[in-house]
Image: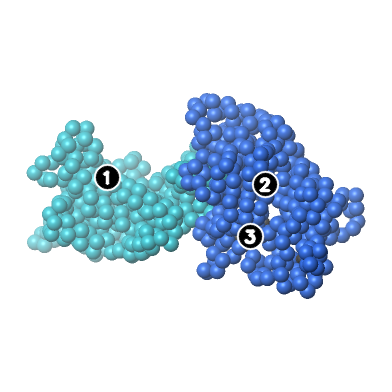
Amino acid sequence: MSESSVLQVNGLKTSFFMDKTEVPAVDHVDFDLKQGEIIAIVGESGCGKSVTSLSIMGLVPHPPGKVVGGEVFFNDEDLLKVSESKMRDIRGNEIAMIFQEPMTSLNPLFTIGNQITEAILIHRKWSKKQAKAKAIEYLKLVGLPRAEALMNEYPHQLSGGMRQRVMIAMAMVCEPKVLIADEPTTALDVTIQSQILALMKRLNQKLNTSIILITHDLGVVSEICERVIVMYAGKIVEEADVKTIFEHPEHPYTKGLIQSVPDIRNKKERLYSIPGNVPIPGSIKKGCRFADRCEFVMDRCREKTPELISIEGDHKVRCFLHQESEEQN
Amino acid sequence: MFSYTIRRLLMLIPVLFGMTFIVFFMIRAIPGDPAQVILGQLATEEAINNLRAELGLDQPWFTQYFEYLKQLLTLDLGESLRTRTAVSEEIWPYMAATFELSFVALLIAVVVGVNAGIISAWFQKSWFDYTAMVVALVGVSMPIFWLGLMEQWIFSVQLDWLPPSKRENVKNPVETITHFYLIDSLIQGRMDQFVDVVKHLIMPGIALATIPMAIIARITRSSMLEVLRSDYIRTARAKGQKMFWVVYKHSLKNAVIPVLTVIGLQTGLLLGGAILTETIFSWPGIGRYIYNAIEYRDYPVIQSGILIVATIFVLINLIVDLLYAFIDPRIKYN
Ligand SMILES: Nc1ncnc2c1ncn2[C@@H]1O[C@H](COP(=O)(O)OP(=O)(O)O)[C@@H](O)[C@H]1O
Ligand code: SF4
Ligand SMILES: [Mg+2]
């Protein structure tokens, strides 16, 4: 584990077992997250982004899901091997998570105050009063007005954007080292989206929290991330810093994703979208998983599976277009 | 909320009015004459006619009904034809007996049913789940009288663990204050009697609890399964919350809403089942009270008894509706 990385994922494999057949939703994913860094995991819906984050949290719905291989190093410990009670100490305390659906991710029957102080009191031996003060402090920190009054309100009284702020306050209140944000802005409208992203960036700078931002929208990525991981059908297909991804994307899938980002200056043009759909995990037995949708597909793409290789520094790609030399030898 | 409650209570009036009408004429449609029953087979025609006149039974039905309503408006429930005591005076001990039994049965049904439902949902498709759901399926269709008789045969006749019937040991009766024997024996510090009362409550309590318990277990299981899959449960787990609290704080409160509906509906069944259970276990409750009154064609007792049971049923359902709003802040009545 390198000096500055807080979280290191090696060969993570998570499968769902449906009628005794194994469906690998996440297939040998490796990445690491450095202290204070914001990385993005990008890919269309169904590529295994949520399953990756739930695997790190130890929250894969079981049955039918199960982490079947790999390592997740955090604080020199493999989270896939620690006990459930140890994992509970880490969840919410050192690694926190927020979800896509702000409308349904808060319990409708408890007040905002109750749910935030709960997050504190699980991990801190504080008095109710201290916890309340802290909760109010964090509601203010995420930019919510009337923080004191909000404590006694119920989720249904808040808008989607406010609820997502509450979720962020709840996730950050124990000052975790890592925040996993699974499509935190997908359900929100555009102006609220950039406010929430700006808020995450601010918290990242203020508290030095490392963030994994999961999204299917590359537009979101350019706003706050430093490094981008592109996932396709359970595998990482490209990884690079954000500038490289946008300026020199190498994988045909990444190129397609970038073309489909709505361009604000070019409203007349019809939005591009990659033809076809993400294959059902496990349905492609051999070859490149993107082959059916790739405009550069070659014969060998259907025969062998390309490896993720480094083409320049930290820029990694999984595509035969970049493995010529190796093949010729 | 307050005005809603008032409105619901006002709506009770036409409902109960309709009830009195139906009950009044239905019981008079049963063949048999109270005067005849009271005086016996050997009574002379004249004696019977005199008694009928005295009781006002010689009047046309609608006149009798009108008199009865006038009585009710002054909150007078009438007088038993048989005992010549005011119904309002003699009904309480019977009601207390039924309340005590129903309360114990509901307690058993809710505690066992809800927990079995939770465990089944949590360990879905485990042996516990399968067993509990088969038992619940059997329980729902259990004939209460058969269950009651089996209980008596096993626990009283064969094992001699529990008394076969009645509310108390008649040789050592509880001195009544509230007529809730559990409370009366406790406030007098009579632990021996308390234990005796509990023993008497077990078998009828279980018999009466069986069907609602089975229904509650099944409803709890299915609503829990739905709640456990919800996003806020994932949030609670992502906070590092313990499984126990995830279930009992976050899930149960949400899952309890449909359970509450069932409880509201089941109290009707509970009161109905009480008549059967009270008969098998010679339980001196309101069911027995009305049942005996029917035998004697004791019209005022039947009318008022059923009216009271109906009122209780409607009130319990009102309470259930108010509880929804108490549990779920999204529900507002206005
Ligand atoms: N609860 C589940 N049961 C069965 N399969 C699942 C479940 N959750 C996810 N999967 C599988 O994992 C794949 C990846 O899902 P997910 O990680 O949610 O995608 P993403 O978050 O990238 O949209 C899905 O295509 C699906 O096949
Ligand atoms: S390996 Fe072949 S099919 Fe896959 S992305 Fe590269 S060129 Fe396209
Ligand atoms: Mg997802």
- Chain designation of label 3: A
Colour assignment, chain A: blue
* Residue bearing mark 1: B100
| SS class, disc 3 | strand
What is the distance, in whole Å, between disc 1 and disc 2 at their CAs? Answer: 64 Å
Q: Quadrant of the C terminus of chain B?
A: top right
Q: Residue at x 52, y 68 (%)?
A: A20
Q: Residue at x 63, y 44 (%)?
A: A1
**Which residue is at the front of the view, B256 or B312?**
B256
- Quickly name the residue at label 2: A32
Q: How many angstroms separate mark 3 from mark 1 (CA)?
A: 61 Å
Residue position for label 3: A27
Q: Is residue A187 visible?
A: no
Mark 2–mark 3 distance (CA, rounded to whole Å): 16 Å
Q: Residue A203 in the image: state x and y as whole percent.
A: 70, 34
- Label 2 secondary element: strand
- How did the renderer colour the structure? by chain
Q: Is residue B20 left or right of residue A329?
A: left
Q: Colour of chain B?
A: cyan
Q: Amino acid at mark 3?
A: Asp
Q: Residue B332 vs residue A197: left or right? A: left
Tag 1: amino acid: Glu
Tag 3 and tag 1 share a subunit: no
Determine the chain carrying the residue at label 2.
A
Q: Secondary structure at mark 1?
A: helix
